[in-house]
Image (spheres, rainbow, N blue to C red):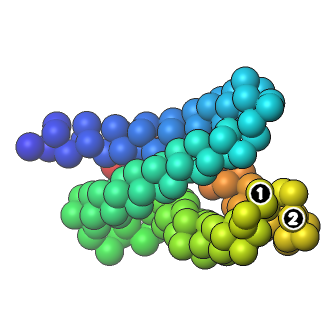
Amino acid sequence: MRKLTDFLYAFSITLWVGGLWAIGYVVAPTLFHELPANRTLAGNLAGNMFAMIAWVGIGCAGYLVLFLFLRRGLAAFRSGVFWLVLLMLLLTLAGHFGVQPIMAQLKAEALPREVMESVLRDRFARWHGVSSVLYLIQSLLGAALVALQQRGK
């Protein structure tokens, strides 16, 4: 059983951090590059993928926190890995349940126009910037998590 839980620990980190980097820095830019005439479609597809990786992150973080507590008990609080996972989870929750609903509301308020063609463009751009900074921080923390992950065990 220990081999399975260890595998799931490493797999959770790989899935979450790999997904963050792949979607944020490979897939999303590729969508905008390949669909220059339809930035709305590219944005909607990227947004759906960011939502998917947020749910993956929530699930992976849940497993990782459980793993660390079951493996280390209260000593998990002294683990850098624990705090990285927790901070990444909080950033995921803030982005997915805080910033993204605001952006979705701005898109809805802009209808029938696209939000970037409406008077709400500047507000949307500011919130998109906030979302991007949260994602960047989360991605960098994820890289640190990969580097430190053996210490979590």
Q: Secondary structure at mark 2?
A: loop
Question: At which x and y percent is residue 124?
Answer: 80, 66
- Relative side of 69 to 114, left or right: left
Q: In the picture, which quadrant includes the N terminus?
A: top left
Q: Which residue is mark 2?
A: 118
Looking at the image, which residue is at 36% across and 44% down?
12
Q: Secondary structure at mark 1?
A: loop
Circle 2/circle 1 CB separation < 8 Å = yes
Looking at the image, which residue is at 42% across and 39% down?
15
Question: At which x and y percent is residue 91?
Answer: 59, 66
- Relative side of 103 to 9, left or right: right
**Mark 1 is on which residue type?**
Glu
Location of residue 147 (image quadrant): top right
Badge 2 density bin: few <14, some 14–19, many ≥20, Cα 10 Å:
some
Location of residue 25 (image quadrant): top right
Question: At which x and y percent is residue 18?
Answer: 51, 36
Vertical position of residue 33 compared to residue 127: above or below:
above
Location of residue 127 (image quadrant): bottom right
**Which residue in the rendered view is the most extreme toward the top?**
34
Q: How many numbered tags mark residues here?
A: 2
Looking at the image, which residue is at 76% across and 40% down?
39
Question: At which x and y percent is residue 101?
Answer: 60, 72
**Mark 2 is on which residue type?**
Ser
For the residues labelled 2 and 1, the Cα–Cα distance comes to 6 Å
Looking at the image, which residue is at 42% across and 57% down?
55
> What label does residue 114 carry, if any?
1
Q: Is residue 130 visible?
A: no
